[in-house]
Amino acid sequence: DTEVTQTPKHLVMGMTNKKSLKCEQHMGHRAMYWYKQKAKKPPELMFVYSYEKLSINESVPSRFSPECPNSSLLNLHLHALQPEDSALYLCASSQARGGSPLHFGNGTRLTVT
Amino acid sequence: GENVEQHPSTLSVQEGDSAVIKCTYSDSASNYFPWYKQELGKRPQLIIDIRSNVGEKKDQRIAVTLNKTAKHFSLHITETQPEDSAVYFCAASPGGYQKVTFGTGTKLQVIP
């Protein structure tokens, strides 16, 4: 039972495509995150939303565009990606206070061709 | 920023033996230390965490110890089972909830 739901599970896109990754949580968490994970590496923070406002952007290229429509939803819009962007994209949520663990979704496996 | 080192990168143990994974951190402001388990093809899941006002925490076969002075913390798994086989990540967070720095991961293999 996954409390953070991500869609789609797999995505193959060309370098000229536009696609979106979606994430939803119903745990009442007010912090939501996008992480990127390459094979055999730890998750790498991309963006943090706190109370629906973007609070951290880890110098992510503009071809990745996050959006937080409400407290339960988080999107990641993709445009003009490069093959090296192929990775597992993980959404996570947590309570918006220190010492709160991350709850990860199952991720979207993205392949850029 | 915070830097978390994790050792070993791979660990093989016989079923029933204990496994120990060690991490060091650099930022003395870090005060929250979670451990995540990631099975192959699955999401990272929290298995145990510890806060800086506690030196040790135990949950059944899993324990974590923290030495603030030396800036290191360790995960101990006793009576290992094949289902413990996974990649384990330590992490450190400086009090705020937004930035969590992960260690490089330890691939644990429990041999039946």
Image: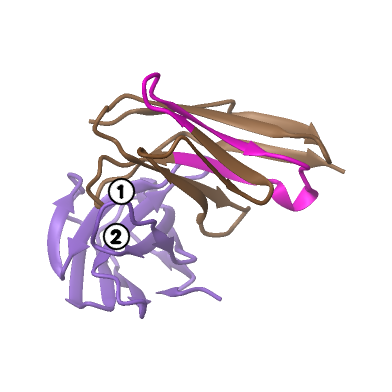
Pick the front one: B73 or B88: B73
Q: Where is residue B42 in the image (x, y as percent from the top left)?
A: 57, 59
* Colour in which the image shows chain B: brown
Q: What element carries label 2?
A: strand
Q: Which residue is drawn at 36% across and 38% down?
A: B52
Q: Position of residue B111 (x, y in %)?
A: 83, 40
Distance of label 2 from label 1 (alpha carbons): 8 Å
Give the magenta part as a residue range.
B66-90
Pick the front one: A67 or B74: B74
Pick the front one: A35 or A1: A1
Q: Which residue is drawn at 83% across and 40% down?
A: B16
**Tags 2 and 1 touching, CB below 8 Å:** yes
Instruction: Determine crowd level at label 2: few under 14, some 14-19, many 20+ residues with C-alpha closer than 10 A.
Output: many
Q: Position of residue B77 (x, y in %)?
A: 67, 40
Image quadrant where residue A70 sits: bottom left
Classify A27 as above or below A36: below
Quarter of the image where the C terminus of chain B is located: top right
Q: Do labels 2 and 1 share a chain?
A: yes
Looking at this rendering, what residue extends furthest in the right direction?
Answer: B112
In this picture the colour scheme is by chain
Instruction: Determine crowd level at label 1: few under 14, some 14-19, many 20+ residues with C-alpha closer than 10 A.
Output: many
Q: Is mark 1 on a helix, strand or loop?
A: strand
**Residue A45, disc:** 1
Q: Mark 2 points at which residue?
A: A33
**Residue B35 colored magenta?**
no
Q: Residue at x 59, y 41 (%)?
A: B63
Q: Where is residue A4 in the image (x, y as percent from the top left)?
A: 42, 72
- Note whether residue A84 is visible: yes
- The amino acid on which the numbered mark 2 sits, given as a three-letter code, is Tyr
* Colour in which the image shows chain A: purple
- Note whether residue A7 is visible: no
Q: Residue at x 47, y 34 (%)?
A: B104
